[in-house]
Amino acid sequence: MSSSIDHVQQLADLLRKSDNIVAFTGAGISTESGIPDFRSPGGVWSKYQPVEFDDFLRHAEARRQYWTIRRESVPQMLAAKPNAGHHALVELEQRGKLQAVVTQNIDELHQRAGSTRVLELHGTAMQVQCLECDKRWTAAELQPRLEADELELICDACDGIMKSMTVSFGQALSADVLMDSMQRARECDLMIAIGSSLVVYPANEVPATAKRNGAKLVILNREKTPLDSYGDLVIRGEIGQTLSAAVTQLS
């Protein structure tokens, strides 16, 4: 692991030498924007049992719990603003170095920052769809209904079940998004895993695939990860501060 003195310089050197970079991001980059990690103490999942997809489809009570969780979690996402880490990735894209962001996050902060090639492995919480007719709403449009304790949302076009466009427990990831992510991982020359515990399968196969196919692997996370021993550079520190400092050195 690099020391706090030289890790920014080492990261900048890797960025400078790379032209096909892929960023893989997890909850850690969003916590710096004030969005709590669902898994952390005090997070949503410490208060509510996650709703399995099959239960959501079959049981009205499960759907009410699902919308209760969203009623609590979505306002923080709507209020959050992209931070220095998001903006640093946008600058790397604008420099022609970053080819894509593969994210586990569901808050669309990458897109709001200006990233144009974002692959959302776990979908987005910022949009809701009808599972029957595919009519869509924004999260902001529906939040007032949740705040008014309307926790059984039914499509006004076909009476179908409505659901956030996130991937729930027990629900398959989008095959197209996963395939695209893996292809970019195989082709990149540098993978930067940012703010992810790297324990969630199959998402954690993205940085692992990059390393197996010859890319350099940088891991920037506050805690240890299972892939640390494979990292060419492992950094413990603030994401926004570290990425911004490294990108600034490219000028």
Image (cartoon, rainbow, N blue to C red):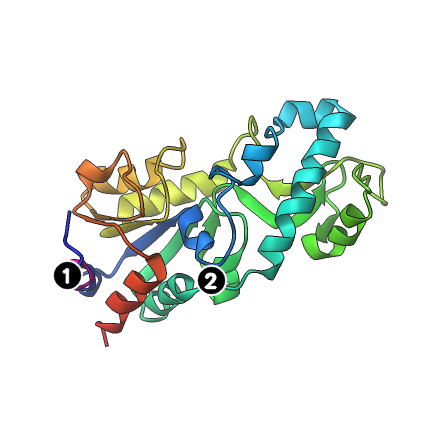
- Whichever of labels 2 and 1 marks the residue nearer the N terminus, that label is 1
Q: 67 or 117, which is in the foreground?
A: 67
Depth check, front residue: 26 or 187: 26
When the figure is inspected, residue 114 is found, relative to residue 216, above or below; the finding is: below
Q: Nearer the viewer's eye, disc 2 or disc 1?
A: 1
Residue 167 is at least partly visible in this image: no
How crowded is the residue under tag 2: few (<14 C-alpha within 10 Å), some, or many (20+)? Answer: some
| Dot label at residue 5 | 1
Q: Position of residue 101 (x, y in %)?
A: 40, 54
How far is mark 2 from mark 1, CA to CA? 33 Å
The part of the chain drawn in magenta is 6-10
- Reading the image, the residue beneath label 2 is 116
* Location of residue 40 in the rendering, given as x and y in whole percent from the top left corner: 46, 39
Name the quadrant containing residue 92.
bottom left
Query: At 26% across and 50% down in the image, what residue appears?
Result: 236
Q: Nearer the viewer, residue 88 or 84?
A: 84
* Residue found at the very far bottom of the displayed protein: 251
